[in-house]
Image (cartoon, helix red, strand yellow):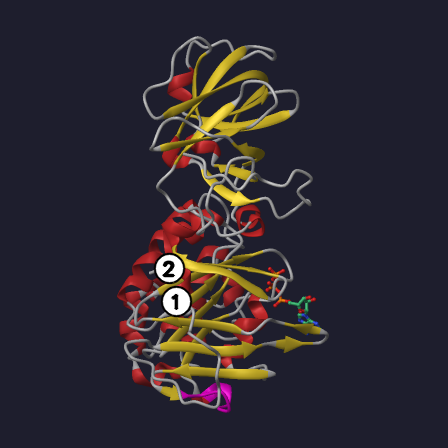
Amino acid sequence: MDAASNALPKPDVAQPLTMGPYALALQGLVTAVGRYRSQPIALRLLPGQTLALLGGNGAGKTTLLDTIAGFLRPLAGAVWLAGRDCTEEPPEKRRIGYLLQTDALFPHRTVAENLQFGRLAAENLDALLDRFDLRALALRRPGQLSGGERQRVALARALAGEPDLVLLDEPLSAIDPATRPALRDELARHLRDCRAPSIMVTHDPADALALGQLVGVMDAGELLQVGPAADVFKRPNRLRTARLLGVENIWPGIVNEHPDETLVRIGLSPDDANCFVDAARPHNGMPLLAGMRVRVCVRAANLIAAPCQQPPPAGYSRLPIRLLDAMPLSTAIQLRGRFGPNLDALAYAPPWQMRGWTLTPDERLALHLHAEDVHILQDDDAPDPAPPQRRPAR
Ligand SMILES: Nc1ncnc2c1ncn2[C@@H]1O[C@H](COP(=O)(O)OP(=O)(O)OP(=O)(O)O)[C@@H](O)[C@H]1O
């Protein structure tokens, strides 16, 4: 499913919505709080589907969750949930499990008492304690729990009693790095078992990729892109989206002609740095015309470090770089290099590959890049001083 098929055709709130198989549909929803206003938001989710919502600070993510939950009134549009228009319903009638940004547990009540608030009537407390592995903690108060345990209680409360929709606002943000992977796996398992759709707000692209079947990117009140997680990460639709998704390398380039039918060459610098992209692959519907100024998006993990003189395998481009620095990260070595007069490249190399390499500044290396891993976007940042020649690149 791509963004276009996920977005509703037209926000026409006068018409009742046919939800088809969808469990949640937002129809031209304009959210507002204080002076903030969103663009109309259209979205639909299947039962059990998780949307991970990424975006910068103040993008409007929490406001969207609060509006869906009924704590804020929308300025326009509708929220359809489990086959009904619930736009005018108060929060308590909506059957939504909401894990707030702060866990919002009652500090003077035990875990068991905290879980007994809300929709638990539909579910046995014992079963819930077992399902979330909370039996040993049932009589403790929130102040006697670790951050990870508190978050598990808050999650149990949000998922209790079979809600029609689950909203999670940064469920892993307060969790320390050691506990985080286990809690993320646990969250993934609970969301997989849940029949309701869910929307999870996160700032972490890794969490979004791990937990969302769909990923949405919000910025300044606008839902810029929604689609299957792998597609959104591989093919962001705009420069703003690419930046919010943390694409490490965004280079200016110019489309060149190329004699090959299958590849298009993109010039990256006035000298000799080029990369190739698939001619057949659509780049957001944009034809790659010779002379066109574009932005070239490349993930650091897709750049492969190689000895300077080693020829690249078929289908790969070669970028000769001068190493600026090398920094060990937890799972990779980060290489920062320069090619052309002033273009920087960031690459993540597996530590085993770098064993025995000289990684001192000014070392000459090459970065190999497969055409499949190059994504081209329109250069919408700066006015284009050179009008493109309307001649297709072959
Ligand atoms: N109670 C409020 N009164 C007035 N303005 C508010 C209020 N809550 C949020 N805003 C404003 O609304 C806009 C959207 O805020 P929101 O909290 O939805 O963003 P967000 O994407 O969740 O951000 P973050 O990632 O920082 O939590 C921001 O400009 C914020 O300053």
Q: Amino acid at mark 1?
A: Asn
Q: Quick check: is 220 in the magenta stretch?
A: no
For marks 2 and 1, give the CA distance: 6 Å
| x and y percentages locating residue 157 in the rendered image | 41, 73
Q: In the image, what residue occupies the spot 52% across and 67% down?
A: 103
Q: Is residue 65 above or below residue 207?
A: below
Inspect this view and state whether residue 332 appears: no
Query: Dot 1 lies on which element?
Result: helix
- Residue highlighted by disc 1: 6
Q: Of residues 285 and 233, which is closer to you in this image?
A: 285
Q: In the image, what residue occupies the spot 37% across and 66% down?
A: 5
Whether residue 98 sits left or right of residue 278 in the image: it is right
Q: In the image, what residue occupies the spot 48% across and 55% down?
A: 172
Badge 2 local density, few (<14 within 10 Å), some, or many (20+)?
Answer: some
The quarter of the picture showing ligand 1? bottom right
Q: In the image, what residue occupies the spot 42% across and 22% down?
A: 351
Q: Classify residue 148 by image quadrant.
A: bottom left
Inspect this view and state whether residue 148 appears: yes
Highlighted range, magenta: 85-92
Q: Of residues 379 and 20, which is closer to you in this image?
A: 379
Q: Amino acid at mark 2?
A: Asp
Q: Which numbered circle lies on residue 2?
A: 2
Whether residue 43 sits left or right of residue 238 in the image: it is left
Q: Of residues 183 and 137, which is closer to you in this image?
A: 183
Whether residue 168 sits left or right of residue 341 in the image: it is left
* Quadrant into which the N terminus falls: bottom left
Of all residues shown, which one is farthest toward the right?
35
**How many marks on residues?**
2
Query: Dot 2 lies on which element?
Result: loop
Q: Of residues 109 and 241, which is closer to you in this image?
A: 241
Say if mark 2 contacts mark 1, CB within 8 Å: yes
Majority secondary structure in the magenta region:
loop
